[in-house]
Image (tube, helix red, strand yellow):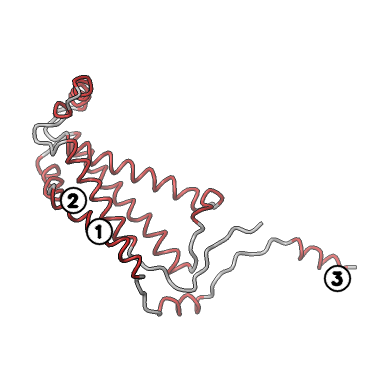
Amino acid sequence: MSGASASSSSSRRRPSLPSDSSETIVSTLDKPARINPSALTKHGKYVLLGALGCWYVDLIGNIKGVLDEEGGWVRKVMIVGLTSHGATILLFLYLVLYLPWFRGYIPNYPKWQSSARLSVIVPLLTTAILLGWTSIVVSLSQAGKRSILESAVDAVKAVGNANLEQMEGERGLGVMKSMAGTTALFTLTLGILGLIPAPTNVPVREKRT
């Protein structure tokens, strides 16, 4: 009777997720990483386009100019943007480097909402990207503006007159160039991160019921 009860309870027990032993993970890490040629072509073009875009608008020089020459809110917004961009990189590295290579599994991204981990990371990643992109664009385009109120008033006037130049700062890069340069920065970053190869024989983690 007790044997039947034990058998019944074991059959109802939730199966544990597959986990790799330390030896398996170490052996996977010892294998040389290879970049798939198709991934190199796919992400390589983003790296190239992003690098060209950053060079064309002199993004690094303009960011450095904001940090060195601007004060007040414009500089603070740039710091927020760069910090958010750094957070974006760290979150991506956690997903494409730490989990596959050091934890031994690949998250099931299509079902991210049912994952306790991804349901937190994906919204954080989306917020970091949007906040970083918006902050860098605002800071680059509004350099020279004395206050946020001045920028807001000029933005309303620019929309009313259909003239983007009215919302640009005296030392700003310009709205269109700021958007193009910041987009190029994120394209370059995501292209480089996409080149990180996934380890072989690593399973996609499925949530079992």
> Of the residues under marks 1 and 2, which one precedes in the sequence?
1
**Badge number at residue 47:** 1
**Residue type at the position of mark 2:** Gly
Above or below, comparing residue 105 to residue 182 in the picture: below
**Residue type at the position of mark 3:** Gly
The quarter of the displayed image where residue 179 is located: top left
Q: Which residue is mark 3?
A: 3
Q: Secondary structure at mark 3?
A: helix
In front: mark 2 or mark 3?
A: 2
Q: Secondary structure at mark 2?
A: helix
How far is disc 2 from disc 3 in space, using C-alphas?
A: 70 Å
- Residue 94 is left or right of residue 67, and the answer is right
Which residue is at the far right? Answer: 1
> Of the residues under marks 2 and 3, which one precedes in the sequence?
3
- Counting from the top left corner in percent of width and height, residue 152 is at 22, 24
How far is disc 1 from disc 2 in space, using C-alphas?
A: 10 Å
Q: Which residue is mark 2?
A: 53
The reply to whether callout 1 and callout 2 are in contact (CB within 8 Å) is no
What residue appears at the point 13 percent right and 42 percent down from the top-left corner? 66
Q: Crowding at label 2, few (<14), some or many (≥20) Cα neighbours within 10 Å?
A: many
- Counting from the top left corner in percent of width and height, residue 174 is at 15, 36
In front: mark 3 or mark 1?
A: 1
Above or below, comparing residue 147 to residue 50 in the picture: above
> Of the residues under marks 3 and 1, which one precedes in the sequence?
3
The quarter of the image holding the N terminus is bottom right
The reply to whether callout 3 and callout 1 are in contact (CB within 8 Å) is no
- Counting from the top left corner in percent of width and height, residue 205 is at 54, 62
Q: Secondary structure at mark 1?
A: helix
State the residue in front, 42 or 65: 42
